[in-house]
Image (tube, grey):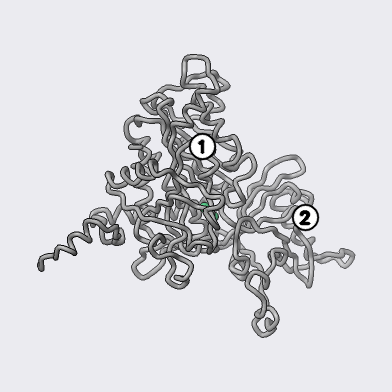
Amino acid sequence: MEEKTDGQQLAEKLSFDLKTCWETAKQEDMAEIEKFAVDYKEFINKGKTEREFTAQCLNILEKKGFIDIENLILKGSKLSSGAKVYLNVKGKSVIFAILGKKPLSEGINIVGAHVDSPRIDLKTNPLYEDGGFALFDTHYYGGIKLYQWITIPLAMHGVIFTKDGERRDICIGEDENDPVFVITDLLPHLAQDQMQKKASEFFRGEDLDVLAGSKPYLDEKVKEKVKLTILNILNERYGITEEAFASAEIEFVPAGKARDIGLDRSLIGAYGHDDRSCAFTALQAVLDIVQDDVPEKTIVCYLSDKEEIGSMGNTGAESRQFENFIAFLCAKSVDTPYSDIDTRLVLGKSAMLSADVNAAFDPSFADVWDKKTASYCGKGIVLSKYTGRGGKYGGSDASAEFCWKIQNILNKNKVQWQFGNLGKVDRGGGGTIAYHIANLGVEVIDCGIPVLCMHAPFEIISKIDLWTTYRGYLAFLKDC
Ligand code: MN
Ligand code: MN
């Protein structure tokens, strides 16, 4: 081999230059990486909404011996090291913990992701008939490019209550024998005017109406025959009347399963990698620790709801639920009478990875990224020191001390990480649940998986980033 020049050696020593993880990973890890991707696809196929994802998590946690912390409080029981507990936040979010060997006052390690994804929600009085069709009127949820969600198969998920107050779970469109739903678009032949409009205007939120059927109910005396057919089917199947839509939570999401992408099968395409890819990897990291010994510090995983609409409400990260959970842990793990100060002390000593996806560099739209600070598919877990938009406005900015600490933990554990800032300065931006938890005094940094086509019905991630991120969360939970 040709000997490297002085300059080459110096450049290698001083520069931060990353290969892809495919080049740096050990060949013996490839089978595990593939297996992890298979498990992930299976999990997200069954958990497409915040409720479904949370239900699956609770199911696994209970199997692994986690206990409902609210029951524990009612019973007056205490917690000791090694205890495994969860808080079910209204079936839409879950917080769970393993108590460590060290007292809580030494701080806890938290990974926090979100389990809601952009989608199309039903309005409260959605069903109407026009032009021989029954249609569902909708209100979209989260920041989507509306035009991406038309003329694709959609599935209907959610809950609705009968007059007697019985809950009915709905899932139509995921089984290959199920019907699906669709939002129609104008044919190109008649789209002259539409095509002149800006992308943000040619399809309006109010136009997102979902086709529900077209068969009239056979009775001349009825005015809206197709609508009645649909109401009748819903009544026969779920025992509901039109009034039930007032309280229902029904979400239309892209129908179908996660798929491998590319001849080399290196990528995964699916609905809602944002943020179920980080939620899944965080969950797996905790489950891994369950198998091991009791961790040194207490570890907590927070899977929140409503991130895509600002984290508001009693299932979102802006609520007191997370703080309450920490207070529960404090109150139940000390022998002395609990004081509110305990919780404040613990929060101030704690560290969190805000586990959310980052916008991976897309060569088709290279202009919006600064290539030096962009994250890339295949180059590992993304560390974003800060978020925000337009002069870092609204962002959460991790301190140099904490950011360095995380870099160091990842380096020591041989977890490949990369930078990631969301685009060029003043080209847009975004946020995560980071600042809600940072506001409590916790050290927080954004850290997650690079994703292509974020918020599209079909998002893309790399299998090796999924696995690397899982290893990153594991390293942080154990070593921070
Ligand atoms: Mn997200
Ligand atoms: Mn998002």
In screen coordinates, is 464 left or right of 458? left
Q: Residue 326 carries which label?
A: none
**Residue 98 seen in render:** no
> Image quadrant for the C terminus?
top left
- Amino acid beneath label 2: Asn
**Disc 1 residue crowd, few under 14, some 14–19, many 20+, Cα 10 Å:** many
Up the image or down, 169 lies above or below 223; here it is above
Up the image or down, 216 lies above or below 474; here it is below
Image location of residue 257, percent across then percent down: 49, 60
Compare residues 265 and 461 and report the one nearer the observer: 461
Q: Quick one: SS at disc 1?
A: strand
Compare residues 299 and 77 and report the one nearer the observer: 299
Counting residues from the start of the chain, the first of labels 1 and 2 encountered is 1
> Image quadrant for the N terminus?
bottom left
**Residue, disc 2:** 125
- Amino acid beneath label 1: Ile
**Disc 2 residue crowd, few under 14, some 14–19, many 20+, Cα 10 Å:** some
Image point (43%, 58%), residue name: 450
Q: Quick one: SS at disc 2?
A: strand
In screen coordinates, is 30 left or right of 54? left
Between the residue at mark 1 and the residue at mark 2, the CA separation in whole angstroms equals 33 Å
Q: Which mark is residue 95?
A: 1
Mark 2 lies within 8 Å of ligand 2 (Cβ measured): no
Return the residue found at the far bottom. Answer: 189
Image point (63%, 44%), residue name: 312
Up the image or down, 399 lies above or below 141; here it is above
